[in-house]
Amino acid sequence: MVKKGKAVKQVATAAQLLERAETLVDQLQPELAIKFFQKAAALEPNNSEIYDAIGELATEIGDPHTALQAFLKSIDVAPKHNPGKYLYAAQLVQGEESEKFALQGIEHMSASLAHVPDHLDESKLLKKQICDAYCSLGELYMSDLCDAHDAEAKCEHYLQEALKFDLGLPDATQAMANFRLVQQRTDEAIAFLDETLKRLNACDEHTMPSLEFRIVTGKLLVEVEKFEQAAYVLEGVMQEDDENAEVWFLVGSCYNALEDYDTALEFLERCDAMLSKLQKDMGDEFELDQQLDTVRSLIESIKQIEPVGDDDGDKDQDME
């Protein structure tokens, strides 16, 4: 008798694994997609695009270790391909190591840019990436590396370089405004903020920066006491996300400074309600007690300036 052999399990090819991974990405299952990309990478260890895909997905889901290892492998396999991976890597490390990766990315992107005609979209994309990278380097010397002996000079250099690749978007001008405020050169900061606001107003759905960027812009406008403009920017943020208690507080503070107390109370009391609910839900894990006290203190101070019900009383007197 002939013995029946065991069924041979069919091994998926790299192409099949990649197809499955991309399907999972479309189905919003990034964790599972990463596993299939990793299996494909084991079959095609010199395919840097697979590592880039793993790195980008891992960054999105908040897995910095997996992301960094993937980008480092991609850099090792194909250092010149997709230089944007250097900028991802720069965001995943700190200090001088971050600076090193950003500068390597800029070097490769600049080399690519030299061979791309200005009118092509690829040229604009490279210029934006280079501009963003220089802005990040400037911010690095206002944060992690702020104690370096040449921090101010480095920051100035990097932000001036950013302006050379500026495409009229608000990133570079906001970074310069922030730097000028750090230097206490307020008049220059205001000029850069005015330009930032002008550029924000000109953005469309494709070029509009993130909510976080616009919140920072609002905070900088508050810092230079441009309260009306700050409220305008921050209320634009609230049209897209009205669940951020800090934004409600900032807008309320702006209207308080503008002496529009009724509107200020509306925003501040909403902030109070949001933080109070969070406090109740989180219990002992709530860590915003100081912020909640600040909100309530400001509400009380406004009510002392303009007690609730005064308007109605004035109207009654006028009718008499």
Image: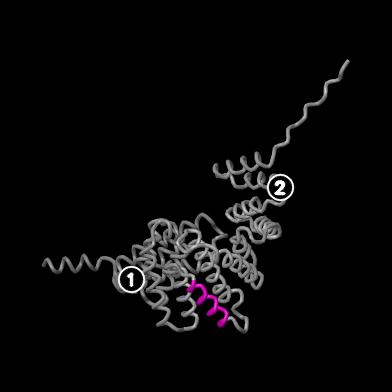
- Is residue 301 left or right of 1 when viewed as pictured? left
Q: Is residue 60 above or below residue 249?
A: above
Residue linked to disc 1:
228
Q: Position of residue 113 (x, y in %)?
A: 54, 65
- Residue visible at 42% across and 81% down in the picture: 188
Would you say residue 154 sits in the magenta stretch? yes
Q: Nearer the viewer, residue 46 or 254?
A: 46
Q: Position of residue 211 (x, y in %)?
A: 45, 61
Would you say residue 224 sits in the magenta stretch? no
> Which image quadrant is residue 192 in?
bottom left
Three-letter amino acid code of the residue under disc 1: Glu
Residue 161 visible (yes or no): yes
Q: Is residue 187 above or below residue 58?
A: below
* Residue 44 badge: 2
* Residue 258 badge: none
Q: Position of residue 279 (x, y in %)?
A: 50, 59
Q: Are marks 2 and 1 in contact (CB under 8 Å)?
A: no
- Label 2: which secondary element: loop
Q: Which residues are magenta?
A: 152-164
- Residue visible at 49% across and 70% down in the picture: 165
